[in-house]
Amino acid sequence: MTVGRGPQGIALLGATGSIGETAQRVVARHRERFRFVAMTAHGNLAGLKTAAATWNPGFVGLVEPGAESLPAGWGRGADCLIEAARHPDASVVLNAVVGAAGLGATLAALGAGKRVALANKESLVVGGALVQRAAIAGGGEVIPVDSEHSALLQCLAGRVGRAGRDGAGLLPVAGVRRFIITASGGPFRTWDVERIRAARLADALNHPTWAMGKKITVDSASLANKALEVIEAHVLYGVPYERIEVVVHPQSIVHSMVEFEDGSILAQLGVPTMELPVLYALGYPDRVEDHGVPRFDPVAAAALTFEAVRHDAFPTLELGIAAGRRGGAAPAVFNAANEAAVSRFLGGTLSFAGIPAAIAASLERHGDLPGEDLPALLAADAAARTYVQEFR
Ligand code: NAD
Ligand code: MG
């Protein structure tokens, strides 16, 4: 991997999404340091044209162009994710695709020795062991963009190793007694169980502290997102599940905490914006001087509060963590069933209570499917999706 002089090349996958646009805002403030050399989107041609006109990357690709004709030289189809992920001018691949569709690009980028600045947590949930093997074989590294995992990395400053043996983690750590991962609690934090079960789409999309894409916003309402994040933390840092705790913190200022073996705890704080974790992942291990984010005022904030998760009201969290502990194809099944259920909830054909019901039923049927390699994981993923699409 050569970086050379001049701005560092970034391939941005999912350029038109919430994280993709956040990354463009951040890089616009640091053009001397970073530039986009490749960009992809799923189906948003107009958005991708705007991004391409702003950044003039060497490669632009649209995954599902539909009937529209593309500008000359653009790539099309799912292969353009791989082409962008291996782009020779990119030293960093910012994977901001949503869903399991991002896994192939993560593997390709690591195989090509790149740094993957990873927003696409689904990559690690579906294919954690494969991602680890790809990092070892290709010499690439994963730096998390998810705010909680960025917080953990910042608290761990300088204590993480490089991906080694299977299961030890992509950024293995020693001397950690406990991770405390914070959750805002989402829009239904204080709702009673029956009201949550019947929650409407507009309620689920009304997140109290973060503005994000629709899928992760629904995941934040069900706490599926936190389940994905517990698995993500386990895969990244190799810390066993029994030492990863989730605590509700409605203000979303403390982004997570690490308790060390002497009992001391470090936390990372900041206003809730993804600009900081994106910039940290791009610049890691350096901190890049930046003045684009509102400063946190502890006096104005006054109170930071913490409370226990209500597992009876949010069964999806335990379903996901149990799938993570079960291993094999179970995390991939949890993820695929959740993606299919959320897509039905967004389309109005499944109730909010139907999301955990469909996931539980799919895990019961598909949780023990083989998951030792990519074809097996993709088969388990497909079985779960098909099942949940028909689930009643
Ligand atoms: P989004 O829906 O706003 O954007 C998704 C992007 O991926 C779009 O550019 C879209 O064109 C592209 N895309 C969608 N499906 C695709 C497919 N099948 N193949 C290729 N590209 C596809 O989503 P987002 O909120 O930006 O989230 C992106 C990822 O980052 C998710 O994994 C999410 O969990 C994670 N994440 C997001 C936030 C946030 O604040 N938005 C925070 C932490 C983690
Ligand atoms: Mg997060």
Image: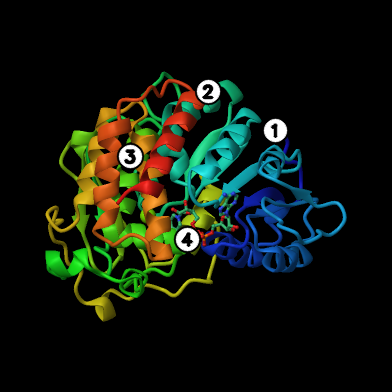
Note whether ligand 1 is within 8 Å of mark 1.
no
As measured in the structure, the alpha-carbon distance from the residue carrying label 2 to the one carrying label 1 is: 15 Å
Callout 4–callout 2 Cβ contact below 8 Å: no
Q: Are marks 1 and 4 in contact (CB under 8 Å)?
A: no
Tell how many labels: 4
The amino acid type, in three-letter code, at marker 3 is Ile
- Of 307 and 337, nearer the camera is 337
Q: Mark 1 = which residue?
A: 1
Q: Is residue 64 visible?
A: yes
Residue indicated by mark 2: 136
Distance between mark 1 and mark 4 Cα atoms: 25 Å
Ligand 2 is found in which quarter of the picture? bottom left
Q: Residue at x 23, y 35 (%)?
A: 241
State the residue lying farthest toward the right: 72
- Locate residue 368, reporting x and y percent: 30, 25
Going from the N terminus, do you reach mark 4 or mark 2 first? 2
- What mark, if any, has residue 231 been given in the picture? 3
